[in-house]
Image (cartoon, rainbow, N blue to C red):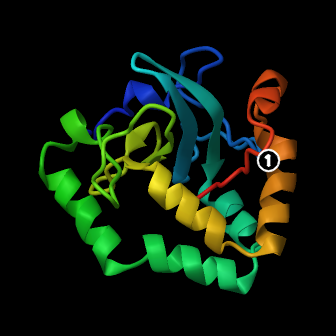
């Protein structure tokens, strides 16, 4: 019996309301290939009842690893220090152990701050065969952490992320007009 947990609806594609089936980069089948993958969606809270999606992506681990190798060494080390450290892993484990299905999307995993009006935030989850990977609860990166990342990534990494964003993510041209200084940060 498969007791793994279904992917939360928040990770469905905005374009059709369905779960992602293919990797945005290599087009591999995420639902049946047994390949772990990440879904990341970036939002901007524009009023109390509405967020707009800045980008969304489903990417297999192979493509995510290839993309991370395009970052500068200093940027990779910085990101690893944030999301590869024991504090992050402990917070994620605590979230998993404490009814994560009901509260994973309320606060930034790092700062524990609630998402406020005008905040940008990202939801991130890791999945396999259309299910949540056990012990890997989805989480939110809040505005403060996103700003810290933008401030600490190298110029080369920012340029690569912009190139990647233009090729694979967007944002929608109408959103680009609203946010002319928007920088893609993909974790």
Q: Could you say which is closer to the camera, residue 131 or residue 43?
A: 43
Q: Residue 86 placed where, x, y %?
A: 31, 79
Q: Residue furthest left?
A: 98
Name which residue lies at 60% across and 59% down.
Answer: 61
Q: Quadrant of the C terminus?
A: bottom right
Name which residue lies at 37% across and 31% down.
Answer: 8
Label 1 crowd (10 A; few <14 / some 14-19 / many >=20): some
Q: Residue 141 placed where, x, y %?
A: 44, 52
Q: Is residue 186 left or right of residue 84?
A: right
| Total marks in image | 1
Query: What secondary structure is found at the residue carrying circle 1?
Result: helix
The quadrant where residue 53 appears: top right
Q: Residue 11 placed where, x, y %?
A: 48, 32
**Residue 1 appears anywhere in the view:** no
Q: Residue 136 placed where, x, y %?
A: 33, 55
Q: Could you say which is closer to the camera, residue 19 or residue 99?
A: 99
Name which residue lies at 73% across and 41% down.
Answer: 24
Q: Is residue 128 left or right of residue 6?
A: right
Q: Could you say which is closer to the camera, residue 64 or residue 156?
A: 156
The residue wearing badge 1 is: 165
Q: Is residue 81 left or right of residue 112?
A: right
Above or below, comparing residue 44 to residue 168 in the picture: above
Q: Quadrant of the N terminus?
A: top left
Q: Is residue 74 left or right of residue 109?
A: right
The quadrant where residue 172 appears: top right
Above or below, comparing residue 153 to residue 168 in the picture: below
**Residue 48 appears anywhere in the view:** yes
Name which residue lies at 83% across and 73% down.
Answer: 156
């Amino acid at each position: 019996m498969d007791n793994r947990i279904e992917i939360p609806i928040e990770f469905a594609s905005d374009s059709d309301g369905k779960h992602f089936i293919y990797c945005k980069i290599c087009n591999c089948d995420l639902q049946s290939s047994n390949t772990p993958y990440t879904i990341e969606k970036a939002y901007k809270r524009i009023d109390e009842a509405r967020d707009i999606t800045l980008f969304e992506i489903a990417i297999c681990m192979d493509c995510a690893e290839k993309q991370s190798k395009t970052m500068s060494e200093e940027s990779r080390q910085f990101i690893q220090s944030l999301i590869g450290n024991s504090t992050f892993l402990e917070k994620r484990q605590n979230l998993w152990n404490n009814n994560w299905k009901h509260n994973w999307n309320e606060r930034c995993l790092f700062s524990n701050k609630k998402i406020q009006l005008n905040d940008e935030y990202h939801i991130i989850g890791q999945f396999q065969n259309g299910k949540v990977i056990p012990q890997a609860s989805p989480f939110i990166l809040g505005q403060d952490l996103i700003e810290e990342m933008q401030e600490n990534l190298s110029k080369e990494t920012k340029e690569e992320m912009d190139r990647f964003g233009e090729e694979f993510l967007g944002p929608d041209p109408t959103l680009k007009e609203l946010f002319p200084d928007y920088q893609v940060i993909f974790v």
